[in-house]
Image: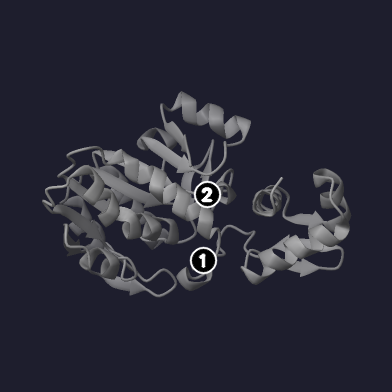
Amino acid sequence: MYAVERQQRIEQILVEEGRVAVVDLARRFDVTTETVRRDLGVLEEAGSLVRVHGGAVAKDADSTSEPTVIERAGRHGAAKNAIAERALTALGPGFHGSVFIDAGTTTAAVAAGLSERLSAVQPSGRPIEAVTHSLTIAPALAAADDVSLTVIGGRIRGITAAAVGVETVNAIRRLRPDVAFIGTNGVSAEFGLSTPDPDEASVKSAIVQSARRVIVVADASKHDRELLVTFAALEDIDVLVTDAEPPAALGAALADAGVEVWIA
């Protein structure tokens, strides 16, 4: 097992159990305790956990904790890029429709790769319509020659740099994008998709309800997580793009809901 894979698994264990012990991880992965300590050091520097005597605890284990968009930007970079590349294959040859890109760091990777994907599937360069409510994603879309951008306004929530509020929700409800790329803080069999903040949940819910096709992009650390507010049931989404097979119960629930699971 490569170090990156081991570190991702450690994060999954933290989500499931809330705490990990160095000795237990060394036994699970058949590596030395020193190797585990190096892994924990890497994850702590990325902001994924807090080291304690003998192991580590989750940094944001409760239902309302939420790291800022800057803190999240450095986490799971390779996984996010792979997920984004796989998700963009949903825009097949000749795509000339409209896309909505939700706020978030994995969706930001989708936005960053959009222009290259469009060049590959529509050499004519005819622009598509793109919509976002994210202040951090809008510049990448605005710089793309093959994208006509609409930015949804509203009250800006600092922790995510995204517009929220009644005006934002109402503006989204007047749209019908062909494809929406949605981020989530958690996805579980019973609670569906969830996020810590009610205002963010209202915006995400409006996007899901408005789009013709909903593609959720979420790395494996989001599997089986349940945050404070649900914004969509599994039945409301069409595709989950992730970097590892979901746990058995979640995988079964996704299949029952008719959700396609794409592994990046």
Relative to 106, does residue 225 appear above or below in the rendering? above
Instruction: Identify residue for label 1.
Output: 72
For the point 64% across and 59% down, which residue is it? Answer: 61
Crowd class of label 2 (few under 14; some 14 to 19; many from 20; radius 10 Å): many
Q: Nearer the viewer, residue 39 or 64?
A: 39
What x and y, as percent, mark residue 2?
69, 49
For the point 48% across and 54% down, which residue is it? Answer: 80
Asked which secondary structure carries label 1, the reply is helix
Quadrant into which the N terminus falls: top right
Instruction: Identify residue for label 2.
Output: 219
User: Label 1 is placed on what type of residue?
Assistant: Arg
Residue 102 seen in this snapshot? no
User: Label 2 is placed on what type of residue?
Assistant: Asp
What x and y, as percent, mark residue 264?
48, 42
Q: Nearer the viewer, residue 58 or 200?
A: 58
Residue 79 seen in this snapshot? yes
Cα distance, mark 1 to mark 2? Answer: 12 Å
